[in-house]
Amino acid sequence: MLKEIKSIPLAIFLSQLGHEPTARKGTMLWYKSPLRQEHTPSFKVETALNCWYDFGIGRGGNIIDLAAELYQSTDLRHILHCIADSYPVPSVPTVAFSLAPRHSAPSMERFEVVPLEHRALVAYLQKRGIPAHIATGNCKEAHYRVNGKSYFCRGI
């Protein structure tokens, strides 16, 4: 069902929203960005892959990613309903219902606490005004796996 939504042609979806390409180069359609004001088209839709990329903001993806940007939401149900409003897909209500949160307990497979060293975590703390020597002296890194997917975070 989600596959059906992702197969909606982006060009048709954009057209339903009132956006038409300004140029076509092979399988690429160029638009003025539907996400912001611009004079020179820098929003590309690759029709063969059914994906988009906005060079002005450096982001792209599939129809769900585009709807998330257009409707400024991370709520998948809301995004699917917005897509359905623009491009009727009979199974969207079923998809939204089937994506209801499941209340099964997550399966944590591994948990490890190590000294804070990961560049991304240290950089994050520095952006928040915490010098690296204070962060590494007072924080730790936690590495863990939940349902087979690895994660890491900063901890105290």
Image (cartoon, rainbow, N blue to C red):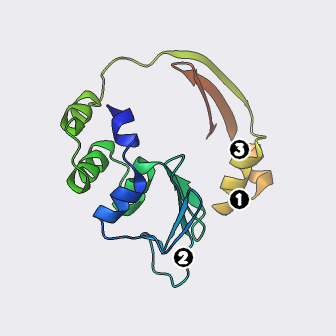
- The reply to whether residue 121 is visible in this rendering is yes
Q: Categorize mark 3 by other alpha carbons within 10 Å: few (<14), some (14-19), many (20+).
A: few
- Which secondary structure, mark 1? helix
Q: Which mark is residue 101?
A: none
Task: Report the Cα–Cα distance between label 1 and label 2.
Answer: 36 Å
Give the camera-side residue of 30 and 119. 30
**Residue, disc 1:** 126
Disc number lying in front (1 or 2) = 2
Question: Which residue appears at 75% of the width and 59% of the height?
Answer: 131
Q: Amino acid at mark 2?
A: Pro
SS at badge 3 = helix
Residue holding disc 3? 138
Residue at 29% x, 29% y is 101
The type of residue carrying mark 3 is Asn
Task: Kindly report the distance in space between the C-alpha atoms of the residues bearing marks 1 and 3.
Answer: 13 Å
The part of the image, by quadrant, that contains residue 76 is: top left
